[in-house]
Image (spheres, rainbow, N blue to C red):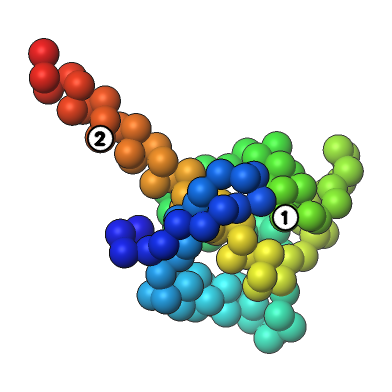
Amino acid sequence: MEGAEKKKGKSGLYEQELTVEQKTQIKQAFDIFDTEGAGTIEVKDLKVALRGLGIEPTKEEIKKLLTEIGQSVSRDQDLGKIKIDFSQFIEIMTIKMNQKDSEKDIERAFDLFADSD
């Protein structure tokens, strides 16, 4: 996410802000899943979108993400009945894209140290 600015997220850590292009792509992905034009999608569609980023979320990870964005989820709640709107979708995608970028940065740093031996 080069060229994007950093801002302080809910966790208090600095997160990369998405570029206009990334936000557009996320909106297009959301619209694909929002087939009825209701402005919401099911959590199962969120899982599919995350898989498109190369992320295979578990049920527990999905529940944690939903909790992070303020969606109440009980331990035994069926995730299939939960719907999220675009603002929640983009917030989750931002969290996951930042995590993915952090993992890439760690891998690059490790490679630099490994190459210096």
Q: Quadrant of the C terminus?
A: top left
Query: Taking the image as drawn, is residue 86 in sight?
Result: yes
- On the image, the x and y values in percent for residue 69 come to 72, 55
Q: Disc number at residue 69? A: 1
Rate crowding at label 1 as few (under 14), some (14 to 19) or many (20 or more) other CA atoms within 10 Å: some
What amino acid does circle 1 point to? Ile
Vertical comparison of 55 with 80: above or below: above
Relative placement, left or right, of 39 versus 33 is right
Rate crowding at label 2 as few (under 14), some (14 to 19) or many (20 or more) other CA atoms within 10 Å: few
What amino acid does circle 2 point to? Arg
**Residue at 33% in and 40% down:** 104
Direction bottom: furthest residue: 37
- On the image, the x and y values in percent for residue 103 come to 39, 37
Which callout, 1 or 2, points at the residue further toward the start of the chain? 1
Vertical comparison of 110 with 24: above or below: above
Q: Disc number at residue 20? A: none
- On the image, the x and y values in percent for residue 50 come to 52, 54
**Residue at 77% in and 65% down:** 83
Vertical comparison of 99 with 47: above or below: above
- On the image, the x and y values in percent for residue 97 come to 47, 53
